[in-house]
Amino acid sequence: MDTMVFDDEPPPEPRDGWLLVRIYVPELNVYKCLQFPSDKVVWDVKQQCLASLPK
């Protein structure tokens, strides 16, 4: 898996060719930062973002 996850520390600047996705869900008090390669399919990014959240 090429995804990087940063839960407790600020993420580094996105590398060239990578996209930074920040997710905040106030109801669950969850904050996630993920980086994806820019050639990744949007559907895959969405699925990985949802999978990273607690059930």
Image: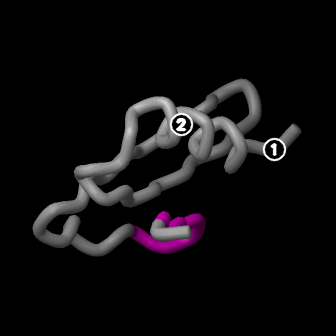
Looking at the picture, tell me which residue is in the foreground, 19 or 10.
Answer: 19
Indicate the colouring scheme: one colour
Q: Is residue 6 covered in magenta?
A: yes
Q: Secondary structure at mark 1?
A: loop
Instruction: Find the residue positioned furthest to the left.
Output: 16
Of labels 2 and 1, earlier in sequence is: 2
Query: In the image, which disc is placed on residue 37?
Result: none
Residue at position x 41%, y 44% in the image: 22
Mainly helix, strand or loop, the magenta region? loop
Screen quadrant of the C terminus: top right
Residue 53, located in which quarter of the rendered image? top right
Q: Is residue 25 covered in magenta?
A: no
Task: Look at the image and give the residue range highlighted in magenta.
Answer: 3-10
Query: Badge 1: how crowded within 10 Å, few (<14), some, or many (20+)?
Result: few
Q: Relative to 8, is 39 above or below?
A: above
Check disc 1 and report the residue beneath it: 54
Q: Distance of mark 2 from mark 1, alpha carbons?
A: 12 Å
Q: Relative to 16, is 25 above or below?
A: above
Instruction: Find the residue positioned furthest to the top.
Output: 27
Q: Secondary structure at mark 2?
A: strand
Check disc 2 and report the residue beneath it: 24
Query: Badge 2: how crowded within 10 Å, few (<14), some, or many (20+)?
Result: few
The amino acid at mark 2 is: Tyr
Q: Relative to 31, is 11 above or below?
A: below
Please state if 23 lies on the left or on the right of 41 as rendered.
Answer: right
